[in-house]
Image (cartoon, rainbow, N blue to C red):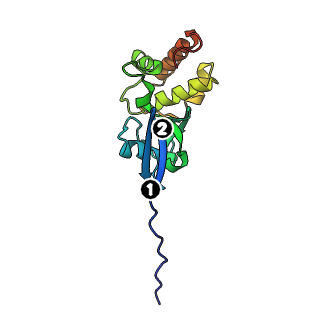
C-alpha cells in the first residue's frame, strides 16, 4: 500500500519594506529569498557578488543599519523596515566614498570580484571603530577572501581611508 506524502501549500509571497541606498522599496518576496537575491534579482543591484553562497567568502557583504552582514545568509523578510547599504550606495553622487578612492589609489583589487564586499566590510569596520592596528584590521577583515591575494593593497587602502577619516573634523565626511 503506497501512501501519498502530505502536500505542503506553496508559500505566498511576503511584503517586505526595505530602504536600500536611501531609497524605499516595497517588495513581494518568497519567504526564503536571501537578501543577496533580493538585491540582485529584484532590485537590479548587482554590485554585491554571489561568491560561495555559504557565508565563507564575504563577496556579498553589505551594511544593514550600518553593520556588515553576509547578504547570502540573511533572509530578506528578516529585515523588514531596515536600512541596507550596498556598494552602489556608498558613493555620494559622483563623489566616491573615501574607501573607494583608497582602493583605486592603492591598487587594492585584482580581478575586482571581491572588491564590493571588501569595501562594504571595511566601511563597517571603520564605523565600528575597533581596529587600530594592522593586525586588528586583518582580523576584522578575515571574513572577506581575496583569491587574487591583494591583501597588502587592501590593508593599505583601509589604513589610508582610516587616516583620512581621522584627519577630518567631526561632522564631515562619512
Q: Quadrant of residue 130?
A: top right
The residue nearer to you, when weighing 93 against 52, is: 93
Q: Quadrant of residue 166?
A: top right
Are dots 2 and 1 in contact, CB under 8 Å?
no
- Disc 1 packing (10 Å; few <14; some 14–19; many ≥20): some
Q: Residue at x 40, y 25 (%)?
A: 109
Q: Which mark is residue 53?
A: none
Location of mark 1 (residue): 30
Image location of residue 172, percent across then percent down: 54, 14
Number of labelled discs? 2
Is residue 82 at all visible to an observer of this figure? Answer: yes
User: In this rendering, is residue 140 above or below 31?
Assistant: above
Q: Earlier in the sequence, mark 2 or mark 1?
A: 2
Image location of residue 63, percent across then percent down: 52, 34
Location of mark 2 (residue): 19
Q: Secondary structure at mark 1?
A: loop
User: In this rendering, is residue 88 above or below 30?
Assistant: above
Amino acid at each position: 500500500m503506497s501512501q501519498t506524502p502530505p502536500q505542503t501549500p506553496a508559500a505566498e509571497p511576503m511584503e517586505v519594506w526595505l530602504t536600500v541606498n536611501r531609497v524605499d522599496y516595497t517588495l513581494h518576496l518568497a519567504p526564503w529569498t536571501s537578501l543577496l537575491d533580493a538585491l540582485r534579482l529584484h532590485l537590479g543591484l548587482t554590485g554585491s557578488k554571489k561568491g560561495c553562497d555559504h557565508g565563507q567568502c564575504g563577496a556579498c557583504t553589505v551594511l544593514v543599519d550600518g553593520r556588515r552582514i553576509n547578504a547570502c545568509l540573511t533572509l530578506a523578510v528578516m529585515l523588514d523596515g531596515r536600512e541596507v547599504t550596498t556598494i552602489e550606495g556608498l558613493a555620494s553622487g559622483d563623489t566616491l566614498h573615501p574607501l573607494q578612492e583608497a582602493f583605486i589609489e592603492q591598487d587594492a583589487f585584482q580581478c575586482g570580484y571581491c572588491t564590493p564586499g571588501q569595501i562594504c566590510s571595511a566601511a563597517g569596520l571603520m564605523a565600528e571603530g575597533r581596529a587600530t592596528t594592522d593586525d586588528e584590521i586583518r582580523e576584522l577583515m578575515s571574513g572577506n577572501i581575496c583569491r587574487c591575494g591583494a591583501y597588502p593593497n587592501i590593508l593599505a587602502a583601509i589604513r589610508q581611508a582610516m587616516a583620512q577619516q581621522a584627519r577630518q573634523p567631526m561632522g564631515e565626511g562619512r
